[in-house]
Amino acid sequence: MDTDTRVEPISFETHPSRYKHWKLAVDGAVGRLTMAVDENAPLRPGYQLKLNSYDLGVDIELRDAVERLRFEHPEVRCVVVTGALDRVFCAGANIQMLASSSHGFKVNFCKFTNETRIGIEDASSGSGQKYLAALNGTCAGGGYELAMACDEIVLIDDGNSAVSLPETPLLAVLPGTGGLTRLVDKRKVRRDLADVFCTTAEGVKGKRAVEWGLVDDVVPRSRFEDAVSTRARELAASSPGRADEGIELPALDKTIDGQGIGYGFVRLDIDRQGRVATLTVKGPPDGLPADAHGIRALGAGWWPLQAFRELDDALLHLRVNEDSIGLVLLRTEGELDRIVAVDEVLERLEDDWLVREVRLMMARVLRRLDLTAKSLFALIEPGSCYGGTLLEVALAADRSYMLDDPDREVVVAVTALNAGAYPMSHGLSRLAARFLGDPGRAERLAAEPRRYDPAQALEAGLVTVVADDIDYEDEVRVAVEERGSLSPDALTGMEANLRFPGVENCDSKIFGRLTAWQNWIFQRPNAVGERGALSLYGKPERPAFDWRRT
Amino acid sequence: MDTDTRVEPISFETHPSRYKHWKLAVDGAVGRLTMAVDENAPLRPGYQLKLNSYDLGVDIELRDAVERLRFEHPEVRCVVVTGALDRVFCAGANIQMLASSSHGFKVNFCKFTNETRIGIEDASSGSGQKYLAALNGTCAGGGYELAMACDEIVLIDDGNSAVSLPETPLLAVLPGTGGLTRLVDKRKVRRDLADVFCTTAEGVKGKRAVEWGLVDDVVPRSRFEDAVSTRARELAASSPGRADEGIELPALDKTIDGQGIGYGFVRLDIDRQGRVATLTVKGPPDGLPADAHGIRALGAGWWPLQAFRELDDALLHLRVNEDSIGLVLLRTEGELDRIVAVDEVLERLEDDWLVREVRLMMARVLRRLDLTAKSLFALIEPGSCYGGTLLEVALAADRSYMLDDPDREVVVAVTALNAGAYPMSHGLSRLAARFLGDPGRAERLAAEPRRYDPAQALEAGLVTVVADDIDYEDEVRVAVEERGSLSPDALTGMEANLRFPGVENCDSKIFGRLTAWQNWIFQRPNAVGERGALSLYGKPERPAFDWRRT
């Protein structure tokens, strides 16, 4: 799905009333997400979504459902993920779709599905919505990767249904949606058993699946529904309640034109000629509520929620619909006082379920920013409002440029939320990742919330470049031009390494180690060449491999 | 350098008397390694090694020197790495060599150079030989990556000499020999400054290089030699002495023929038709010394040292000279009692400098095995001796097959050395990585050294498959055939993920995150296509990029 051949942009927004592939039902504390893929409704023509296989369209609905369950149904404390087909839970990502997609689209498809699955784990750890995968039939590849994102997996024991990761033996690619990592890092399956499992196309079923740790339980067909319901109720009961009533997430109010997208608090401007986008976040308006009741009344219109939902949508648009854009200039507009005041509310009301939910969502959006394969330069200019939560946007950037103008005040502000409210994928705060060489410095900065003028910001290491009004414009212009002259691939690889110094965890291993290897394999002739296994899947010819090991 | 076009295999053995590119000198506690690359002595014809640029041949000598300093010169406590040219320390990996190499060769070249640089860090941490990079001129790309592997970096301050990582701006590839990782993870350079540095082809010099943490000191030409000598003596003084006299590392006694290589304790058999190699390690002979004096007298002929030097050589041969081999069957032959006895000596004499040095070397060789991009199956059969140190070989395997033969005893043994004497790249013992899901189990097993018959070994989780004498042969044959039918690329990616569950550190990030991204980029048309930057380097044409971001 290349920019050139695209007819209209892919939208990441949807609503349960429009779902084609999932059924979302809520019964008290238990929600149920049933995969019922309409095989005749692929995102683009050219393939059928047979056997509950999925494409990006299916996953856009899944992500929507997971987000809505958190905001609209806080009463739900366990979500059952199951399938509507007989004998098959899910056949994984659609192979014809993968085989006919461009390299860039495949990579972005996997990134989004990875983020959605990590979002499920975030809903469990952050919102106490436990996920139970109820595998009512065979579960292959991406289907099993989805199951592994859940807290528990129950597999039907019918003598036939198995879990499997057949990517390597059948398609010559990896289970790249977290599969290999979750297998040994999350489920801690013994590595030699994992090796056998991942090279056995037919998978593992029944008692052995439990013994190897691939699933948590197997249950005969006759008792399957009962066992799932019982376990779902137990999981729900194990999770503390949050609230009885949620807030609605309406469609975003946005205007798309050839030059970009305008939202309420976000504006994306596209310069295709220059391959540069400008992403502007407008800070909070005046008169925002400072108490939980007022915030609830505003609901999805509360600035933190609305602005970051809009930012999220803009990032997804940039990634999938604007692949020729290499550099994103990050800007903020507004009054610093107001974002500092919002941060004070976000901090003080941390225990309110909705405020907590919003903070977690903002953290996810900022992680989406970290993981976006575009160069990011933050511009800190008069009228900007890089304070606390919005300072994270500048800290996520590869570089930041701050104008030192004697006539117009330019300041940034650190707040308590910079201490770790919005962790990166690998668990560090952006300040801690920035000051890895000076342990404690991040904590010291966040412990004394204050403002920084250009000289102070430079001294504190919060910005990359400070330039006065004579030099600033040239400095930025040259940097933008230089960035635009470099290989987009080399920049993607460079940024993927420099952005995540320090420790790694399961999430960051998925985006670093696993994804990088999958991207490598997604280019290899043995997978995607004319006679590669992915290209020939479902066709009568056998793949022909170049046997040299790399 | 493909198998098809290879005339004779690359040898990884050399000796200072035959060095073409380095000068090794020892003066008391300070060693000096001077890079003086002979531009007319490339490893294969087709390029010149100008400006102290390097190819695999240069790095084979470096690795030899680092190893010899540890064993032959234990009196050395600081090693100065410097260059023999005027104004240039090292221009990095040779671009013409890279541009004209196959993908597989590039990847293996980088892997070996990475292991050599990690070996320098291992010499510092394990043997107290501190490395001081004395950059007497400009230092680009791989040259700076080598410098970053040293404990400290001193750069000449002559108004011209800079350190740089120009790979991304000039070649559209990554500084893939640990550069990006060491920059932010080891030297902890701030990530935005690292971004500027890595996109600035001319690099950074003088005071700014110190301020950014790129080097530890800059010294004017007039005082450079003095400052380096002084700092080298200080570093040497800061490291406790080990011994006054080392042991010699003679050339390995080996016989190469079309079928493989025979060494004293190791035999490598190649089945090119089946794309399978068999790597057999013979256990210790009878009557080995149990005291430091006796071990010193045997020197390089002591079984642990000789056998693992041979194993290392066989692994390097397999990687670079036998790229069509996809599967290595690992075997041991010998008496279990004897390897258990050797382990007892290795454990008891841990504080002896030579025993310690041998243990560290064995750990490096086992890490080389973990990082070898071939499938590894261990065969545990009558006459094998998988005890302790040699059990690590089976634990490094992707799978192990154990024969349960009522007529012939087959046992494996755990010894105290399995508790962590031979850590993997990411710092875990192989037992701990194996039992990640059962914390403490590895420690419990190692705390009670004992033997395991097939049933016990299976129960303890030490082996993958146990089969009786009726089934064993078929089971192994089918597994070998199946493995041989799978895509070598998918297997490389799969194994790179499954072998390293759990934490990551700087070393494992280099081999996981960084290397995987570099391998991806090493295939991208923007780097290696006809009009890619790597292909066109040094030619008048400008590269033409596909600007789509992935």
Image: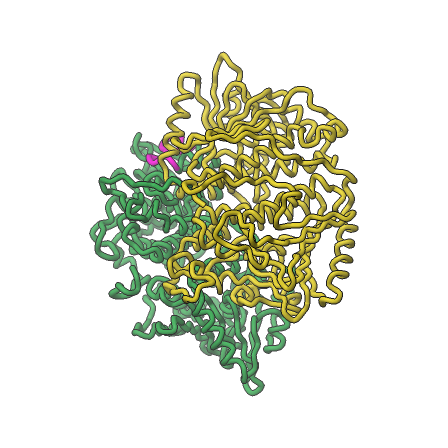
Chain colours: A green, B yellow
Place of residue A117 in the rendered image (x, y in percent of width and height, measured from the top left): 40, 51
B185 left or right of A370 in image: right
Residue at point 28% right, 48% down?
A: A530
Residue at point 30% right, 32% down?
A: A160
In the rendered image, the residue lying farthest to the bottom is: A407
What segment carries the magenta color? A199-211
A268 left or right of B378 in image: left
Place of residue A162 in the rendered image (x, y in percent of width and height, measured from the top left): 34, 35
A27 left or right of A358 in image: left
The quadrant the N terminus of chain B occupies is top left
Q: Is residue B13 magenta?
A: no
Place of residue B293 in the rendered image (x, y in percent of width and height, measured from the top left): 77, 29
Q: Give the quadrant of residue A326.
A: bottom left
Q: Is residue A356 visible?
A: no
Q: Up-down: is A412 above or below B408?
A: below
Place of residue A151 in the rendered image (x, y in percent of width and height, measured from the top left): 43, 45
